[in-house]
């Protein structure tokens, strides 16, 4: 393996982000809201061995795919 395995987004933050996506919150506002949520819940931390608290590009595309699948939209 050439790189370390990816640590997944924290499940609490993922649920919060999905709820915002379901409400069609614009991407810039979504990122801001998730950052505020994470800082309030886990001040000064970026994550632990079970999940990270800062959104990555991979997280965004993965969660958009989840929302699309829930809506029955083609990939």
Image (cartoon, grey):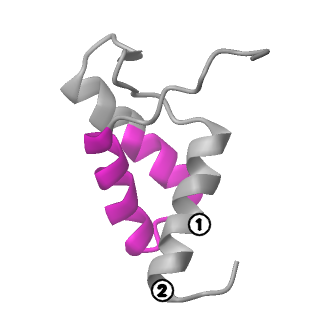
In percent of the image, x 46 and y 66: which residue is there? 25
Q: The residue tagged with tag 1: helix, strand or loop?
A: helix
Count of marks placed on residues = 2
In percent of the image, x 60 and y 22: which residue is there? 5
- Residue tagged 1: 65
Q: Position of residue 14 (x, y in %)?
A: 36, 48
Q: Are marks 2 and 1 in contact (CB under 8 Å)?
A: no
Residue 73 belongs to magenta span: no
Magenta highlight range: 11-34
Residue 36 image-quadrant placement: top left
Q: Is residue 52 above or below residue 60?
A: above
- Give the CA distance from mark 2 to mark 1: 10 Å
In percent of the image, x 59 and y 50: which residue is there? 60
Q: Is residue 71 above or below residue 53?
A: below
Q: The residue tagged with tag 2: helix, strand or loop?
A: helix
**Quadrant location, the C terminus:** bottom right
Residue 12 image-quadrant placement: top left
Q: Position of residue 54 (x, y in %)?
A: 47, 28
Q: Residues within 10 Å of mark 2 (few under 14, many from 20)?
A: few
Residue 12 belongs to magenta span: yes
Q: Kindly give the residue lying farthest to the top in the view shown.
A: 44
**Quadrant location, the N terminus:** top right
Name the dominant secondary structure of the magenta segment: helix
Residue 26 visible here: no
Instruction: Identify which residue, 57 or 73, lies in the foreground.
Output: 73
- Residue tagged 2: 71
In percent of the image, x 64 and y 15: which residue is there? 4
Q: Position of residue 33 (x, y in %)?
A: 38, 45
Q: Is residue 5 above or below residue 26?
A: above
């Amino acid at each position: 393996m050439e790189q370390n395995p990816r640590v997944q987004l924290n499940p609490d933050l993922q649920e919060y982000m999905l709820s915002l996506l379901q409400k069609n919150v614009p991407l810039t506002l979504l990122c801001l809201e998730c950052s505020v949520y994470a800082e309030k819940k886990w001040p000064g931390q970026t994550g632990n061995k079970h999940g990270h608290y800062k959104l990555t590009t991979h997280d965004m595309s993965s969660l958009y795919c989840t929302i699309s699948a829930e809506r029955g939209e083609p990939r």
